Amino acid sequence: MSVKAKLIIDDMEVNILWFTFGFNQGADISGRPSQRPRFVGLKLIIETRKDLNLAEWSFSPNEKKQIELHIYPIIMGGKTRKLYFYDCHLVSWKNDFTATGSNPMSETLDITCAGVEDSTSAGVYSAYWRETFKKDNVEATILEEIEPKLVEYHFENKNGEVIEEKDIKGNQEIELVITTENANGTTIKVNLNNSRLDFKHNGEILENDILKGVKINDEETRVPLTAIKQ
């Protein structure tokens, strides 16, 4: 292995056996980002130290720590990469021990945080709830979140042909076709508001013509319905 990693916490240096962290940014069907970047967490397995007590941090929903992750090159002349994590919460803490083999006793940590900075990058990640900054001139970057939008909906018959509401017959099987923008991953409800017909979905008649719990995974969503005369 050409690198080793250390966790700097409570003025102590702790050996890291494994770690992963990352960011996620939702995209629409064209691949264009449609949501603000979100830190999905720092997960680590560290070597247990008798003088490091994480219990209080794990038990408290309000305690926040500032930690660092240092990645040292083994090769002479390499540059150390330093990652800074601000306003961190320990949301999962697990201790592991085995009496067989030569593996040390370890602790598995799952950490969320409000800010991330990288010594190899000028970019700064800040969630809206970040309070601690490395420098006074660094301010939280709050990116505008694009609001999901219901563009329109229409009905189609079993042949995929658009059908007007006035032409829908009782006991006819149809599809509700919903067009949305920036709504991937959200759940919406649609008010069909029809005075002539009721609609059935998954064997149940819609109450007040309101279709609830529609999961949006694309710009176009299709929902099978059966029209029923009132």
Image: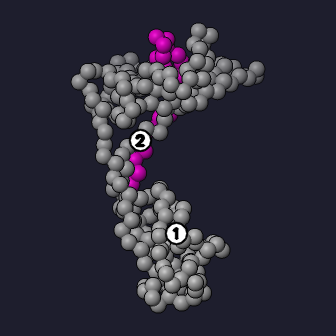
Disc 1 secondary structure class:
strand
Q: Quadrant of residue 198?
A: bottom right
Cα distance, mark 2 to mark 1? 32 Å
Residue at the image position 29 percent from the left and 36 percent from the top: 141
Residue 159 visible in rendering: no
Q: Is residue 181 left or right of residue 63?
A: left
Q: Is residue 180 left or right of residue 52?
A: left
Q: Main secondary structure of the magenta part?
A: strand
Q: Residue at coordinates 43% horizontally, 44% vertically from top-left?
A: 24
The residue tagged 2 is 38
What residue did someone put label 1 on? 210
Height in image: 38 above or below 160? above
Instruction: Please tell me how crowded label 2 is: few (under 14), some (14-19), or many (20+) other residues with Cα within 10 Å.
Output: some
Which is nearer the eye, 95 or 142?
A: 142
Give, as a three-letter code, the residue at label 1: Ile
Please give the name of the residue rendered at 64% of the width and 27% of the height, measured from the top-left corner. 94
Lateral position of residue 28 relative to residue 43, left or right: left
19 within the magenta span: yes
Residue 45 position within the rendered picture, expressed as x and y whole percent measured from the top left:
58, 26
In the image, taking residue 96 as reference, residue 18 lies left or right, namely left
User: Which portion, as a residue range, is magenta?
Assistant: 1-27
Q: Amino acid at mark 2?
A: Arg
Q: Is residue 180 visible?
A: yes
